[in-house]
């Protein structure tokens, strides 16, 4: 569909800024790697059914959940049609009492591809997964390896997300030729959305999230977003749905915007729950493998994810190979984990670390930066403070008691939480919105967080009321709470029992996201029909 003249002028200016910025971007430490791939060279991608974009590592895990929930192609001669939803749902239609009955916050969701004659939409067979970061790509490569073993009906490509220059996005669409594009969570890309509008390719946002500051910025060019915005949005909360509606000018639930269960609940519920669900799928006789959990959440072992060493080198054990605890940490060691810590809170956390070492000299401490390029900065800070850090990638035997380990591999954080006695989840001591503090709970550990949790308002206050999250106002209080938890941690089985009771009813987001994919595929893709 052609764009209006003033929108084309805006895109031309946007593209010119990208082209002028290329020399600067080429020198950027995080973007220099794979720089040429971000310019969409020939054979960047081959034609696919669906293109799924996840900005970074966290969203890439959600892309993996979506991959697992996509309908499974089954044999035509089995007499059951062409596709089967996880949980025994044939042709993608929700069956009463099955896991296909997914509550989206506004009633029971039914995929638009279902027909009364049982002939569902053609199954998704080819998927392109992209991410902007090395951490995100590492997760997506593991998802593709999982699919090769567990979902042979899927052909999964992984590629770095191009720079959002409109011309480059047009080239990317010309190569991938997707029937639909799916964006995970937060980022609306002007170049990609405009290219999809011109090509008539339907775009959807799943697990959609939009903060008030983001909405205010987007509203500066409100008319542009209404011209190129996604035609389907499944938001993670009523507030997020309202913001998307304000921006896109659509009525929630009636014309493209509604609410879905948060996909993070599908990921964080422990293996025992997921295994139970997989058993029910197998009992229905339909593709139990599609509900397998990505191998990252073993309790008592750093198992199942392998990882990527800072700088992007694949770990020797990845993907899917367990890393025995005895090779990394002492069995039963007293361990504090600082997970997903951000640059803005490093100075405050260093003071916490020094106090822990002073009062608990034999306790091991693991620092897991949110961004791998901060590993070197952490090592420098600790050496300056008189501490000799140990890199995770250098360990072949457990270090001496009282070691401070800087985690320079990506993909092992969940299992690291499982080995911890006390945990702090970063992005929360500074006004950064917080990181996912549900993950340590899924491993039976009560997390400590700072006061800045704006990105997780959707969680609500029930976990705090049950004592399953400890919110502290500052670094000094954080040190007090971690020391308390080291002495008297809540029993792991009690944490798991309470957390599962809270989280299990909130699952279903991945299946809802798969239904959104089917809705997009049912839309016309010819130019001018969008």
Image (tube, grey):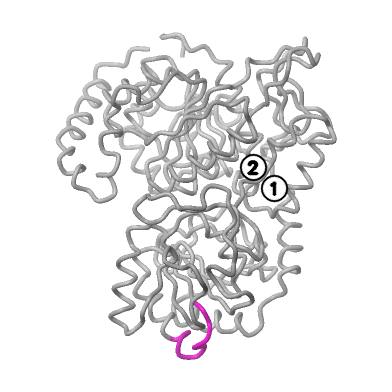
Find out whether the residues at labels 1 and 2 contact each other: C-beta distance under 8 Å: yes
Image spot of residue 497 (x, y percent): 76, 63
Nearer the observer, 266 or 9: 266
**Quadrant in the picture for the N terminus:** top left
> Taking 219 as reference, is 525 left or right?
right
Q: Disc 1 and disc 2: Cα gap in Å?
A: 6 Å
Nearer the observer, 83 or 116: 83
Nearer the observer, 472 or 504: 504
Image spot of residue 528 (x, y percent): 42, 9
Say which label, 1 or 2, has the lower sequence index: 2
Which residue corresponds to the image point at 39% horizontal and 81% vertical from the top-left? Answer: 351
Which residue corresponds to the image point at 35% horizontal and 26% vertical from the top-left? Answer: 44
Image spot of residue 467 (x, y percent): 67, 71
In the picture as drawn, the residue positioned furthest to the bottom comes out as 359
Q: Is residue 335 magenta?
A: no
Quadrant hosting residue 14 = top left
List the residue tagged with mark 1. 506
- Is 184 above or below relative to 478? above
List the residue tagged with mark 2. 261
- Is 184 above or below relative to 204? below
Q: Which residues are magenta?
A: 355-364
Circle 1 SS class: helix
> Residue 204 got which mark?
none
Q: Is residue 361 magenta?
A: yes
- Is 356 above or below relative to 217? below
Which residue corresponds to the image point at 59% horizontal and 78% vertical from the top-left? Answer: 333
Q: Residues within 10 Å of mark 1 (few under 14, many from 20)?
A: many
């Amino acid at each position: 569909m052609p764009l209006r003249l003033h929108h084309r002028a805006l895109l031309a200016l946007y593209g010119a800024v990208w082209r002028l910025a290329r020399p600067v971007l080429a020198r950027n430490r995080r973007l220099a790697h794979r720089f040429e791939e971000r310019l969409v060279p020939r054979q960047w991608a081959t034609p696919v059914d669906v293109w799924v974009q996840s900005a970074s590592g966290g969203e890439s895990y959600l892309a993996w959940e979506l991959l697992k929930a996509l309908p499974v192609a089954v044999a035509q001669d089995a007499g059951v049609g062409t596709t089967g939803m996880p949980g025994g749902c044939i042709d993608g239609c929700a069956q009463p009492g099955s896991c296909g009955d997914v509550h989206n916050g506004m009633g029971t969701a039914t995929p638009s591809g279902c027909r009364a004659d049982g002939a569902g939409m053609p199954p998704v067979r080819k998927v392109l997964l992209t991410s902007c970061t090395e951490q995100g790509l590492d997760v997506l490569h593991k998802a593709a390896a999982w699919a090769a073993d567990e979902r042979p009906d899927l052909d999964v490509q992984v590629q770095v997300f191009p720079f959002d220059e409109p011309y480059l996005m047009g080239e990317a669409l010309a190569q991938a030729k997707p029937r639909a594009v799916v964006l995970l969570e937060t980022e609306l890309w002007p170049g990609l959305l405009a290219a999809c509008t011109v090509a008539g390719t339907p775009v959807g946002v799943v697990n959609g999230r939009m903060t008030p500051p983001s909405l205010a910025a987007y509203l500066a060019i409100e008319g542009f977003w209404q011209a190129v915005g996604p035609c389907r949005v499944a938001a993670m909360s009523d507030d997020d749905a309202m913001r998307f509606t304000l921006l896109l000018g659509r009525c929630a639930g009636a014309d493209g915007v509604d609410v879905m269960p948060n996909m993070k609940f599908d990921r964080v519920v422990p293996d025992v729950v997921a295994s139970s669900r997989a058993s029910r799928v197998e009992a229905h006789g339909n593709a139990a493998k599609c509900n397998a959990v990505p191998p990252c959440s073993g309790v008592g072992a750093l198992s199942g994810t392998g990882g990527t060493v800072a700088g992007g080198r694949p770990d020797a054990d990845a993907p899917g190979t367990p890393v025995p605890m005895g090779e990394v940490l002492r069995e039963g060691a007293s361990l504090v984990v600082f997970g997903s810590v951000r640059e803005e809170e490093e100075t405050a956390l260093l003071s916490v670390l020094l106090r822990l070492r002073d009062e608990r000299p034999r306790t091991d401490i693991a620092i897991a930066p949110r961004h791998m390029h901060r590993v070197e900065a952490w090592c420098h800070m600790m050496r300056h403070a008189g501490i000799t850090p140990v890199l995770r990638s250098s360990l072949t035997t457990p270090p001496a008691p009282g070691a401070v380990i800087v985690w320079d591999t990506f993909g092992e954080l969940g299992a690291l939480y499982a080995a911890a006695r006390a945990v702090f989840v970063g992005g929360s001591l500074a006004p950064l919105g917080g990181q996912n503090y549900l993950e340590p709970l899924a491993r039976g550990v009560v997390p400590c967080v700072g006061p800045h949790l704006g990105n997780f308002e959707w969680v609500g206050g029930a976990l705090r009321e049950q004592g399953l999250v400890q919110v502290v106002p500052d670094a000094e209080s954080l040190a007090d709470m971690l020391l308390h938890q080291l002495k008297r941690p809540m029993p792991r089985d009690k944490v798991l029992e309470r957390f599962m009771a809270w989280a299990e009813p909130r699952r279903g987001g991945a299946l809802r996201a798969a239904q959104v994919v089917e809705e997009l595929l049912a839309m016309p893709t010819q130019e001018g029909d969008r």
